[in-house]
Amino acid sequence: MSDGLSDEWVVDHFDHLSPEFAQSLHPSLAKARRLCPVTHSDRYGGFWMASRYEDVLAIAQDWETWSSELGITVPYQETPAGMKIMPVAVDPPLQRTFKRLINPYFTPKAVAPWEEPTRALVNRLIDRFAAAGHCDFIEALARPFPGLAFFDLALHAPAEDLAEVNDWATAASLTHLPESRDSMLKLAGWIGNFINARRQAGPRGDVVDAVLDADIEGRPISVAEAIGTIQLLILGGLETTSGALGMTMQRFCANPEIPEMLRTRPDLIPDAVEELLRLDGSFICIGRTARHDTEVGGRLISAGERILIYWASANRDEEEFDRPDEFVIDRARNRHIAFGAGPHRCAGSNLARLNLRVALEEITRRLGDFELDLAPGERIEYHSTFNRAPERVPITFRVLE
């Protein structure tokens, strides 16, 4: 395994947009934890980065000091003017109003009826490629699956729109790319048309109805706020689950004993999901802005300065997790923060867990002997900014039934 980028790069020139960093993510973050767990980078006009579990968790929970509303990114391609992805772009107490709109639709009880339709969808996707004995796992299952499930079960949106929306959601998530802003605008335009159609079609009793009928501090929700809230649901529900599945398949190929264990002990799959999220969760970081002068990890940070907090690093912190880089199915304590922490913790975590569990149950039941199918010298590349997902995972496998 790579020992990460240079000490100087990690301490002084940290660049979360670097393709080299995407390749050496965990070794470089381990070096940051060891050398300078709260470090200041000179890139993009300067920003801070926190890598230890204790600091990341403290920042995420302290919204009165660390604001989302003042800016969740370090300077590069900003969100189009006037567009806010709700509720991550506002702070409490207003943030809680928007969070209360969507939370009831993603509780364990609310998503439980989606299990069997989700299982049927996974099997339909497997049916399409199983006979070939090979596929690009991202294209064949990891990418279409969460979108198809979410569009049908959560949004009741037209399935024929999914491929285009998936493309926009992926590009919009990569905020450093030139096409990101245009994709964000296209996604917002689609949502605007979708909610207009939903208003005309009548209620479905789903989260879309809840958003459209919402009362925000004594007034009707605005069109921009409704679009921003649906936009968050899409961005949070598609690329993150796709990335987690892609990373899981890479681990299955590298550690074949894991899928074999899950095949013989499917009761262990819920614990495996938690450990895979800890090791390879695709939601790797987020940004905050200091409201006032403060101190983190012995470093003084001034009001208005921005900081990236790395969930991916916190989840492998040696001070919090024993054997942090190993897959440990019977880990006694797994307080991972793959879904974030604090008031902005992912509202869709129960749905993500359901999707991942069902997908792993069916994949390990029906397929085995996974191997990466890469040409000599070829490597897997990653979409990587706040979310990290393999661009492709070509595999071969054996059909078990």
Image (tube, rainbow, N blue to C red):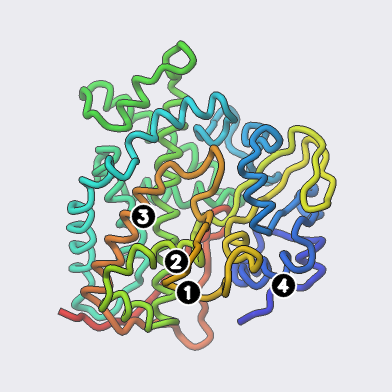
Pointer 2 with pointer 4, Cβ within 8 A = no
Pointer 1 with pointer 2, Cβ within 8 A = yes
Q: CA distance from mark 1 to mark 2?
A: 7 Å
Q: CA distance from mark 4 to mark 1?
A: 24 Å
Tag shown at residue 207: none
- On the image, the x and y values in percent for residue 81 come to 60, 30
Given the image, on which type of amino acid does mark 2 rest?
Leu
Q: Earlier in the sequence, mark 2 or mark 4?
A: 4
The answer to whether residue 68 is above or below residue 15 is above
Tag shown at residue 353: 3
Residue tagged 2: 276
- Please identify the quadrant where the N terminus is shown: bottom right
Given the image, on which type of amino acid does mark 3 rest?
Arg
Q: Secondary structure at mark 3?
A: helix
- Horizontal side, residue 106 vs residue 129: left or right: right
* Residue at the extreme left: 401
Question: Quick one: label 3, few (<14), some, or many (20+) residues within 10 Å?
Answer: some
Name the mark nearer the viewer: 4 or 3: 3
- On the image, the x and y values in percent for residue 362 come to 24, 67
Residue tagged 1: 327
Name the mark nearer the viewer: 4 or 1: 1
Q: Earlier in the sequence, mark 4 or mark 3?
A: 4
At 83% from the left edge and 52% from the top edge, which residue is drawn? 298
Q: Earlier in the sequence, mark 4 or mark 1?
A: 4
Q: CA distance from mark 1 to mark 3?
A: 18 Å
Q: Earlier in the sequence, mark 1 or mark 2?
A: 2
Q: CA distance from mark 2 to mark 4?
A: 24 Å
Residue tagged 4: 5
The answer to which of 33 and 330 lies nearer the viewer is 330
